[in-house]
Image (cartoon, rainbow, N blue to C red):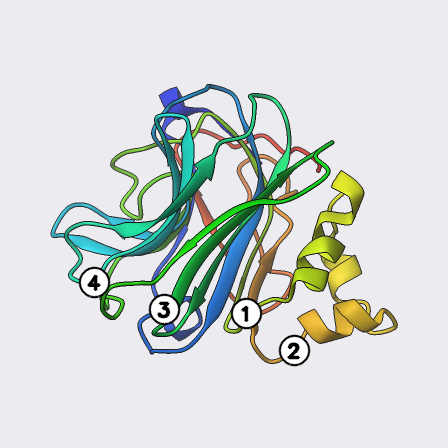
Amino acid sequence: AYFTAANKEYLTIAENADLSFNGGGNFTFGCWVKLATAGAAYTLLGKLTETGDQREVWISTSGGLIYCQISTAGITGVGVSVTEPATNVWALVIGKFTAGSEIRIRLKAVGASVWTESAAAPAGTIFNSTSNFSIGATGDGASYHLNGAIDSAFVTKRLTTEAEDDWLYNSGNGRTSEDVLNAADPVAAGLNDANLKALWDLKEADGANRAASKGSNTLTPAGASLTTVGE
């Protein structure tokens, strides 16, 4: 889906157990992203509402970097960052949290030969926020609206392997939900386990709800009609 910041477009769903991250377990979340503006402050996806200090887990951009962050008290974020991809270039960004030991971000743009990544030890436990889960802006839609496109977003309550990350990248071609749900593919069969809580292609018609290909977490569009884009 393509997001226009001036129209305050974003996708949202109320918090629920599938999309909560404070339970002390491992998780991985990510998406394909194509930025239209360099160096801007955007929310890509996660649970982040500044009003009332309801920050939990999110991936965002600011100052030429792309961040994966957690909050331990809902007030500020701690995390890791890598250089954001060039504008108008698709990149797969993945955030990973190993409970009690590591937060990691991995990014690979189309045409890149290697992943860029950064990791650090988290300080404290993740805050239990009441924020909506959102894509393209903060959970309440108040700020950090994206100029650009997001595709093939997912949440799984385990750590993906590097081999699975490479499979999702697929030489820069990405994967559709049909690929991930294909039980005949051994890598897909591993990804499509009980831990995969949400998988969104984000290709529905303009203005339509974005149904989850896995799980029941349908995203509701806000702002003007979002534009459908492919990978």
Q: Mark 1: which amino acid?
A: Leu
- Mark earlier in primary sequence (2, 3): 3
- Mark earlier in primary sequence (4, 2): 4
Disc 4 from disc 3: Cα separation: 11 Å
Q: Quadrant of residue 121?
A: bottom left
Return the residue at label 2. 193
Give above or below for 187 relative to 204. Answer: below
> In the image, which is nearer the foreground, mark 4 or mark 3?
4
Return the residue at label 3. 21
Disc 2 from disc 3: Cα separation: 18 Å
Q: Mark 2: which amino acid?
A: Asp
- Mark earlier in primary sequence (4, 1): 4
- Mark earlier in primary sequence (3, 1): 3
- Residue situated in front as seen by the camera: 203 or 119: 119
Numbered-mark total: 4
Which secondary structure, mark 2?
A: loop
- Residue situated in front as seen by the camera: 228 or 74: 74
Q: In the picture provided, is 66 more to the left or to the right than 63?
A: right
Residue 58 on image: x %, y %: 37, 51
Residue located 27% across and 67% down the image: 126
Any part of residue 209 in sight:
no
Return the residue at label 4. 72
